[in-house]
Image: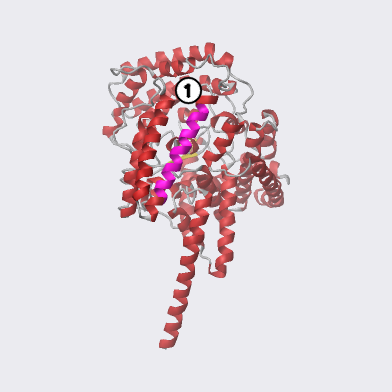
């Protein structure tokens, strides 16, 4: 389902306390009322949202859909078939509305939602037919509680965390423990030898983090002073331990070492994330980008070395030299805040895109959040019923789990990296894109149901590129390093899933050529093989599609091309897939710009004649 895809791709664990706002800027503004057609489209969207909600209420609650704060994911018997039936019924209702709807914008949104419904049904059928239904239950419980215990939710909603946890542990009348239901769904399919079990690495990572999730939930209850949860917390501890013992004895011995997905399921994953080309073509394009980006890094590296006093010329050694100037953990937030405050004026001065008139939020991730999502990520604010809440850029400090506890990220805690990482997760990247969707009143169909990682991650990588000319030289080198990583992703993800490279060699590329730390390389490989296979290529592919569209638009408009207007237009379209976004630019933006140009010419002539 599309909200689930959104949750995975943006690593939604839910917002926690944010950095204090800068006093010189006003607080977040309340979103403006949506146009009439958007309001009508959103009414239709709730038909599909309400069909999906019982099967994933935590996600819908996170995005602001009322009535689901105390509910948990439906893992009851035959849940996959029941989910497909509910979505198919909602889709039939939307198709009936499409037959009578005349507004072209609403019609487009209905078509988006009907296509999203069909895609989610397809994914459900594929997974039920091909995969054993294993669930990392403790991680999901942590995510569900973390979604409520947040400064973005009111105290009344935070109190629902007790009700939700009671449902998770089976203390609510008519419910069973979530861990028990997860076990039952796995065991009832275990006799089917045709179903693919989870990967050994995936199960091991889950087992390594169970205690971290339990501690994280207890910490949240204490931090938000939620009373009445003692019995449920005690039951949670007991059930997590029992689940761990069961997973070690039942799941782990049967787990597979080959991380490749069945070809048709991997093809579906690519389509779901918005990659609409053959993976072989994606790999070829990424290989060219990889080698060209590496050459650019080698050209700039000696200049950076000279400026920073580093005794090296190879880009790898120069990056390692930059990483030695580490920012202490207690200074990370203030340091990033300084870069955040510096970026807004640069964006405005150079007319890159319109900037919200309030500060961006950023914080460090907790240990439990880092276990659930060990990479920097952006947590969007509610898309429904938003009254001024803001999203948050979250920076993890490590990749928790079994292994050498001395291993720490060195990828995000040095000065040169702060520029491109802030541009990607913050402004003008994810933070600005999702804030624009809320504040500009973009329909739910074009946010939750049109969502594709190609659009979201493509925009964020494009945002990085827009900022590069205005960054210090060392920041430009790291921006290229991150672009190299995105090219590596688009190569290695399909290569691993198609059996063209092994994990060890892929890890060598990430550590030696891209210069990632060992824990960062590990989370990258986990992403490609079991956390989100197919998603990693969306960064490079989305960026290349936007750049193609940018060139085509510049050619069409010549020296009259307006970067500010173009970038604002892209944001106004929500999360349309690349083909639909290109169509909107060609059929709406370019003609309007030509009309505006002719109007300015006529006005200038009239003014000249008046003199």
Determine which quarter of the picture holds residue 600.
Answer: bottom left
Q: Which residue is mark 1?
A: 135
| Quarter occupied by the N terminus | top left
Residue in the picture at 50% in, 52% down = 580
In the figure, is residue 40 to the left or right of 544?
left
Q: Answer above or below: position of 188 versus 19.
A: above
| Quarter occupied by the C terminus | bottom left
- Specify whether residue 150 is in view: no
Indicate the position of residue 411 as horizontal and vertical percent values.
58, 38
Chief SS of the magenta region = helix
The magenta-colored residue range is 108-127
View extreme (left): residue? 156
Residue in the picture at 47% in, 15% down = 188
Determine which quarter of the picture holds residue 607.
Answer: bottom left
Task: Answer whether residue 116 is magenta in the image.
Answer: yes
Indicate the position of residue 512 as horizontal and vertical percent values.
69, 36
For the residue pair 591 and 148, the one nearer the viewer reads as: 591
For the residue pair 79 and 535, the one nearer the viewer reads as: 79
Indicate the position of residue 594 as horizontal and vertical percent values.
49, 69
């Amino acid at each position: 389902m599309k909200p689930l895809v959104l949750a995975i791709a943006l690593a939604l664990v839910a917002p926690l306390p944010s950095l204090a706002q800068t006093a010189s800027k006003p607080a977040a503004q309340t979103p403006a009322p949506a146009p009439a057609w958007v309001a009508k489209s959103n009414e239709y969207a709730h038909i599909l949202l309400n069909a999906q909600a019982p099967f994933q209420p935590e996600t819908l609650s996170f995005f602001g859909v009322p009535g689901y704060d105390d509910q948990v994911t439906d893992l009851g018997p035959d849940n996959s078939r029941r989910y497909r039936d509910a979505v198919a019924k909602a889709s039939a209702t939307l198709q009936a509305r499409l037959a009578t709807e005349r507004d072209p914008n609403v019609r487009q949104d209905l078509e988006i939602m009907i296509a999203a419904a069909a895609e989610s049904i397809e994914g459900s059928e594929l997974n039920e037919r091909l995969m054993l239904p294993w669930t990392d239950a403790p991680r999901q419980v942590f995510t569900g509680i973390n979604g409520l215990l947040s400064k973005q939710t009111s105290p009344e909603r935070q109190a629902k965390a007790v009700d939700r946890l009671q449902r998770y542990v089976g203390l609510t009348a008519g419910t069973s423990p979530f861990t028990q239901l997860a076990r039952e769904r796995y065991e009832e399919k275990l006799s089917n030898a045709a179903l693919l079990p989870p990967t050994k690495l995936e199960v091991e990572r889950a087992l390594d983090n169970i205690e971290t999730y339990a501690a994280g939930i207890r910490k949240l209850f204490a931090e938000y002073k939620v009373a009445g949860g003692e019995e449920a917390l005690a039951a949670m501890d007991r059930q997590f331990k029992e689940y761990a013992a069961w997973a070690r004895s039942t799941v782990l011995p049967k787990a597979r070492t080959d991380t490749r997905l069945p070809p048709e399921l991997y093809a579906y994953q690519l389509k779901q994330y918005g990659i609409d080309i053959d993976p072989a073509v994606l790999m070829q394009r990424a290989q060219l980008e990889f080698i060209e980006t590496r050459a650019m890094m080698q050209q700039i590296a000696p200049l950076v070395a000279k400026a920073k006093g580093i005794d090296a010329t190879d880009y790898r050694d120069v990056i390692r030299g930059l990483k030695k100037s580490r920012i202490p953990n207690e200074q990370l937030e203030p340091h990033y805040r300084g870069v955040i405050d510096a970026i807004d004026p640069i964006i405005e001065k150079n007319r890159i895109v319109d900037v919200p008139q309030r500060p961006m939020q950023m914080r460090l991730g907790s240990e439990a959040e880092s276990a659930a999502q060990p990479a920097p990520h952006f947590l969007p604010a509610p898309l429904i019923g938003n009254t001024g809440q803001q999203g948050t850029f979250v920076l993890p400090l490590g990749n928790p789990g079994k292994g050498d506890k001395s291993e720490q990220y060195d990828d995000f805690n040095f000065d040169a990296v702060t520029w491109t990482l802030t541009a990607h997760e913050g402004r003008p990247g994810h933070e600005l894109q999702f804030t624009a969707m809320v504040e500009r009143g973009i329909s739910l169909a074009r946010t939750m149901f049109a969502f594709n990682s190609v659009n979201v991650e493509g925009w964020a990588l494009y945002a990085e590129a827009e900022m590069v000319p205005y960054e210090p030289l060392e920041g430009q080198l790291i921006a290229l390093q991150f672009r190299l990583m995105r090219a590596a992703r688009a190569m290695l993800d399909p290569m691993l899933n198609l059996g063209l490279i092994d994990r060890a060699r892929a890890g060598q590329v990430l550590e030696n050529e891209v210069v990632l730390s060992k824990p960062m390389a590990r989370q990258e490989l986990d992403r490609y093989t079991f956390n989100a296979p197919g998603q990693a290529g969306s960064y490079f592919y989305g960026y290349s599609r936007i750049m193609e569209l940018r060139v085509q638009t510049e050619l069409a408009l010549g020296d009259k091309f307006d970067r500010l207007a173009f970038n604002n237009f892209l944001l106004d379209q929500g999360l349309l897939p690349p083909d639909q976004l290109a169509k909107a630019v060609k059929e709406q933006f370019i003609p309007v710009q030509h009309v505006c140009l002719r109007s300015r010419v006529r006005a200038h002539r009239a003014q000249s004649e008046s003199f």
